[in-house]
Amino acid sequence: MKKVITILLAAVMITSTFAGCAGSANPSSETTAPATTSAAKTTAPTEATTATLSETDDAIVDAGLKVDENGKITDKNGKEVKTEDGKVEVKTEDGKTVKVDADDIKDANENKKAVSSSKKSSSSTSGNKTSGSSSSSNKSSSSSNKNSSGNKTSSGSTTTKKPSTSSSTKPKTVAVTSVKLSKSSLTITQGKSSSFTVTINPSNATNKSYTVTTSNSNAAVSCSGSKVTVTGKKAGSTTITVKASNNKSATCKVTVTAQATSKPTTVTDDTLLTHKQVASDSTMKKVTDYINSYFKNMGFVYDTTLNKNNSGWLYDWSGNYGGDYYFSLNRIKKEASECFYNELAAITALDGLTFGKDIQYSDVRFNCYYQKRSDGEYDIFFCYG
């Protein structure tokens, strides 16, 4: 069956609706996202709060995925599941494929427990219990009895009354389990900006506010909702730390390159290129020639008859290498070839196969070529069969 995968060399952007930080932060400063929390106390009788599972949680639970104390991921049969970069794929009810890691699996199972627990509603009871009256007809004089409250009744009847009782429920506090960033590293030119998104897990965490700090003044940050924007101030490196309300955190390494004062007179394979130089026939030919040579040297079978219409194919495009003086030819060749290989290995892994063990490189035919688009960009197709 034909498999079509679009490769984006930039990290996938994962967004989540939550209260993010507002305003901007100066270098070496802290930007705080306002917490959106609510606490309420209700007195019974009340309706129980109903917890829900996300589509991804449902997919994880349906697959029976679990994580043991050693971090090993197993399926519902207890068999270890192979991972790619620590992640496995699950399919949601609407047919979408989602990559999840051990933290996501733990969160899904915890959320499943919360859903089961929420189905038990609290109830309050109140009522009076009255004992029957008793009298003695053998005695000429009547005697008085004490009731449960300590009051006497002249008729000799005893009444016991229990006070009404009520129960109260308090919303459960859901703690943050992890902070994830869509990018673990950034390279930006001085005066330019780039961004990444923040995801606070689990999605139903009570307090999803976060703070963003930089380790020095080489870059400045500002944030809006789940998006954090980084602006290069001066050449060098810095570390951006995103921290949740309970100190769970994640970092992004940022490299700021100096703004080029003029176009290089001599262009080598290590020269940082303008986007116009990247999006050109000469650069694309060098890239695709290198990729074809890279896979031929590994033992794959080069077949020029393969194209995107008669085979499986992977995809890259010149727009992935945007901006001036960000990428050299050597870097583009390395990233594209390694990315194609990793994606092809991931596809075979979905069928339970492994290169070098279940299949040989010589079992796979391939062809890499490029096409120019009407907007001036270039599509790169890696076809396989």
Image (spheres, helix red, strand yellow):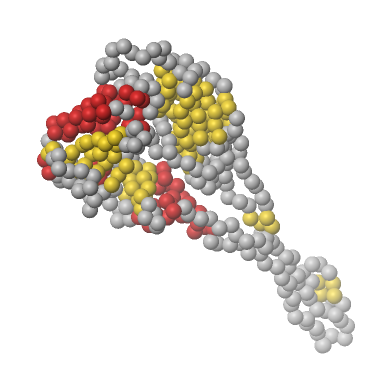
Residue 320 appears in view: no
Q: Foreground: 235 or 40?
A: 235
Q: Position of residue 385 (x, y in %)?
A: 17, 46
- Locate residue 325: give its quadrant: top left
Q: Residue at x 48, y 19 (%)?
A: 191
Relative to 196, is 262 above or below?
A: above
Residue 114 appears in view: yes
Q: Position of residue 132 (x, y in %)?
A: 75, 80
Q: Position of residue 115 (x, y in %)?
A: 50, 57
- Locate residue 322: give its quadrant: top left
170 sits to left or right of 68:
right
Q: Residue at x 45, y 18 (%)?
A: 190
Relative to 210, is 124 above or below?
A: below
366 sits to left or right of 183:
left
Q: Residue furthest bottom?
A: 138
Q: Position of residue 316 (x, y in %)?
A: 30, 36
Q: Residue at x 48, y 54 (%)?
A: 53
- Locate residue 225: give its quadrant: top right
Q: Residue at x 78, y 74 (%)?
A: 159
270 sits to left or right of 191:
left
- Total marks placed: 0
Q: Foreground: 373 or 54?
A: 373
